[in-house]
Image: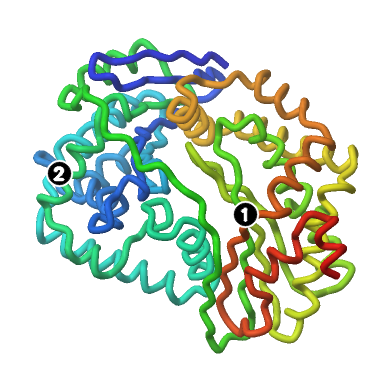
Amino acid sequence: MEVRVSTLSNGMTVVTDRMPHLKTAALGVWVRTGSRSENPHQNGITHLLEHMAFKGTATRTARQIAEEIEAVGGELNASTSIEHTNYYVRVLAEDVPLAVELLADILQNSTFDPTELKREQHVILQEIGAAHDSPEDQAFDLFQETAWPGQPIGRPILGTPETVQGFSSEALNGYLTDRYRGPEMVLAAAGLVDHDALVELAERQFNAINPEPAASDCDARYHGGENRLVKDLMEAQILIGFEGRPYKSPDYYAIQILASVLGGGMSSRLFQEIREKHGLCYAIYSFHWAFSDTGLFGLHAATSEEDIPALMPVILDELVAAGSTIRDEEVARSRAQIRAGLMMALESPTARAGQIARQILVHGRVLPMDEVAAKIDAVTAADIRRVANETFLGTTPTLTTVGPVGQVMSADAIASFLRTPQLRTAAM
């Protein structure tokens, strides 16, 4: 594999990972803008803009965009997250010029036709409705909002019915102008690609992109707290969280491994103790979300109302125990899982293009796999135990629940349970 990086005259980065054994290429544009870039009145506009980019340009209708890419057997799609938006294509190698031209067209020449806009607003309202019909989706939206209340990072990616219905074509154009700027954009490609040819194409096609940087996002301030939504359901959705680590934290890999040891698979502590030993829920897992300046460690369980009183102390006991009993063999197993995931991504051009694009946006460079592997291997059981204590003990938890949740411990009770061992022993 051969990674190369260039910068266009407009400040846009072009990064490629040539995989000569393939006959295809995956490429896309990743933009450093997401839901946390929005002000309160803009909530949901990043996601709506991502939808509207496919709904017609000055030279193509929405149907023509779809027909052109599918005529060569390609795939074109997009997604929006809290910090990034990406538009990606998978094509045969000889169709890379068409893919670049289509991406440039939809990101520079979209018309945001009012009729198409009204139709797509209705589609997103249905998407919001579907999320509200899913107890798990509701719990995660509340989780994000409770961790960072009143902040852009805590608002839903989809927006609200009120904000989504209020957007105009002018608002979309204004947001595109403000946020889609060269220094915030990465054209990444992996597969059978020629770096120099791609740079030449991009320089020519993305000639209308503003070379000035966009405004920085507001800093995030973790808050935590509690948010319950009582509903008549068969299962209770429970999310418990704590302040995590940003991407560039020295403890980033340690907390990722901690999440894996606690709840990253069937051999994890939470799964073995809660599902296999006690049978208190069907599925339980832990995770860590990293962002540019903050993070959120969480665990999710879905259980019946009658099992809640027994479930909560077992979960919290496992969090306390993590600070003193995590063993070398558990860390080794989780390190192997994470390394394997990274290596498997190298075999997929789509995954690899996304990986190198995000690394450019977050770190300003592509991280060599040997460097990443070395950092993962350097994490010890002692590091994990320290990070577990720093994360769980004496901190402010985030608790969100949806369903028959009257017997779930309060956030204050969880915090009391998770005091430092000396204080916890005294309290008991």
On the picture, is 323 further left or further right than 57?
right
Of the 4 image quadrants, the one containing the N terminus is top right
Q: Examine the rendered structure and indicate whether residue 253 appears above or below residue 360.
A: below
Q: Examine the rendered structure and indicate whether residue 169 appears above or below residue 176.
A: below
Based on the displayed image, in which of its 4 quarters is residue 237 positioned?
bottom right
The residue singled out by tag 1 in the image is: 242
Residue at x-position 87% and y-position 47%? 324
Three-letter code, disc 1: Phe
User: Looking at the image, which is closer to me, 416 or 295?
Assistant: 416
Three-letter code, disc 2: Gly
On the picture, is 152 further left or further right than 232?
left
Based on the displayed image, in which of its 4 quarters is residue 368 positioned?
top right
On the picture, is 259 further left or further right than 179?
right
Residue at x-position 54% and y-position 76%? 228
Q: Examine the rendered structure and indicate whether residue 291 appears above or below residue 205.
A: below
Q: Is residue 257 visible?
A: yes
Residue at x-position 25% and y-position 40%? 68
Circle nearer the N terminus (1, 2): 2
The residue singled out by tag 2 in the image is: 174
